[in-house]
Every structure is written in C-alpha cells, then in structure tokens.
Amino acid sequence: MQGKRMAGIAMAILGSLLWGISGPASDYLFGLGVTVSWLISSKMLIAGVVTLAIALVTQRRAVLAPWRQAHSAGQMIAFILFGMIAMQYIYFKAVAVAGAPTATILQYLSPVLVLVWLAFRARELPRRLDVVIIALAMVGTAMVVTKGHFTQLAITPQALLWGILAAVAAAVYTLLPASLLAVYSPLVVTGWAQLLGGLVMTVVHPFWVGVPHLPASGWAAYAFVVIFGTIVAYLVYLASLQYISPTAASLLDAFEPLGATVTSVVFLGFAVSGAELAGGALIIACVGLMALAGPQAPE
C-alpha cells in the first residue's frame, strides 16, 4: 500500500512538473515566431486524437457516453468553449505576454477564486481561515507583480490583465466540468474537449496555415509541449488519483509554478527577484492551507 501511495505521489509531481515546464517551452516557441492560436489548434488536435484513442482501447463503451443525453452534451459544449479553449488560449497568451514564471504563478490563484465563488454561490460568508488565505494570496500577488515595490507595477498592465484572466479561466475550467466528471470518465471528457476544442481553434487558425519554420530546437520544444506537457502530463496526473486523494494531488500542484520558474531561469535566462519568489511561495502556501483545511485531509 505504501509503495502504491509513493507511486501516486511521484506521478502527481511528474504531471505538475511537466505542465510547469511546458510553459517555458511555449515561451521559447513564441520567441521563435509561433503564434498562440497556431500552437493551441495544433496541440489540442493531436492531444485529443491520442487521448481518445487511448480511451477507445481502454474504455470503449464509455467514449460516446457524454453525448447520449442532451443535458450532458450541452455541458460538454459549454466546457469545450468556456473551459478547455478559454483556459488554454488565455494561459498561453499570458505566457507570451508576461513570461512563463509570472503567468504560471498568477494562474495558481485559481483555487482561491474557486473558494470565493463557492462561498458566493452558497450565500455563505467565508470562514475566518478563508479570509486569511484570500488576504495572503492578494499580498503574494502584489509581491509578484510589483517585485516588492508596492507603489509601481513591475510588469505591464497587459501582462497583469492576462495573468489574472488566466487564473479566472483556470477556475472556470475547474468548476464547469465537475458534474460531468462525477458521471463520466475524465479521460473521455478531456479527450473530447481537446479534440473538439482543437477543431474549433482550427476554424480560427487552421494548423496548416502559417506553419512556423523552426530550427531543430524549436520542433523539440513543440514536441515536448504536445507529448509531455499535454498528453503525458494529463495521463500520469490522472493515474495518480488512483493512489492518492484529490486533496493530496492538489498540494503537489505546487510543483507546476516551481517547474516553470526553475526552467525559465536556467534555460531562458529569466531573472526572478526575491520578492517574486516570496510572493509565489505565499500563493502556493495559500493553496496548501486550503487543501489542508478542506473536508478531506491529504492521504
């Protein structure tokens, strides 16, 4: 049992790290002239085909299940448009504008936004601990975007806007499919969302139009984003939930901004100030407090 738990922890960490590293890899691609819309349309199509192919082999009867009822089909369409596409596009736009470390750290505010929304929907005041968490998250955000100089922004207003929108989009991505995932296979739901989301984005920017001329290092970065940052990251993270609780997995999500920051500093030459690191650590700690104070203790 302990061995399986350790395997689950390792898979959750690996998934989060791969997600995090894909941010700087995408940032590198944007520097080579790759557009956000081309990257999203091509990678979502490939990931969707591969994910649904795996589902066909392992869960054949479940593949069409979400489309058999009008209500769940409507939920799928909403998730594809306002969850999958919005989250993917806005996050990568934030990376292109703000850089991977800042974009990933700001996106990590999404659990705090989910907390606020759930309290609002339930028409309940947040607990005192929740108020403290929200306040600390705001302080952490201020440290990231001002680098400790609270009277002026250290990033452009556009970068701040896309970073905050990335957090909102990630929160919507978390909330929208909750009822779907309670009934249908996560592999199937995500596979369809990736495939159909990719088809929608292909209407916006066909993947065969404006194919970038990349050096070998660029195609290697693209392959990493598609294979490891999208397909493998999701599959290993999903597999980890067989051995550890969702609460424990959410704590290990902290490796995503860590992976993005370290990779950006080491390979892309990003300079990260002490205030940014402290602010990022504060945001990560807030999410950890939320998980520990939730209804399920980490296992």
Image (cartoon, rainbow, N blue to C red):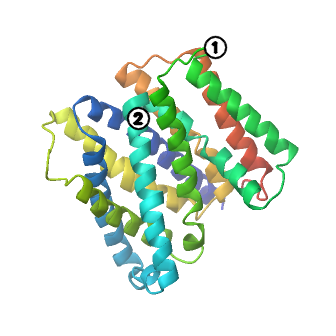
Q: In this view, does 123 lie above or below 159?
A: below
Secondary element at image label 1: loop
Q: Is 155 on the left or on the right of 116, as rendered?
A: left
Q: Name the residue under label 1.
A: 151
Q: Is 223 on the left or on the right of 256, as rendered?
A: left
Q: Is 71 on the left or on the right of 218, as rendered?
A: right
Look at 26% across and 43% down and name the residue there: 222
Q: Residues within 10 Å of mark 2 (few under 14, many from 20)?
A: many
What kind of residue is marked 2? Val
User: Is residue 235 among what the camera can see?
Assistant: no
Q: Is residue 160 above or below residue 68?
A: above
Q: In this view, does 188 lie above or below 15?
A: below
Look at 41% across and 85% down and name the residue there: 61
Q: Is 17 on the left or on the right of 203, as rendered?
A: right
What kind of residue is marked 1? Thr
Quarter of the image for residue 201 reads bottom left
Q: Compare residues 1 and 213 and report the one nearer the observer.
A: 213
**The C terminus: image quadrant:** bottom right
Using the numbered discs, state the Cα–Cα distance from disc 2 to disc 1 in whole angstroms.
24 Å
Question: Which percent across, then down, holds residue 15?
Answer: 48, 49
Q: Earlier in the sequence, mark 2 or mark 1?
A: 2
**The N terminus: image quadrant:** bottom right
Question: Which percent across, then down, holds residue 22?
Answer: 39, 40
Question: Which percent across, then down, holds residue 166?
Answer: 50, 43
Look at 27% across and 59% down and name the residue there: 46
Q: Mark 2 points at which residue?
A: 95
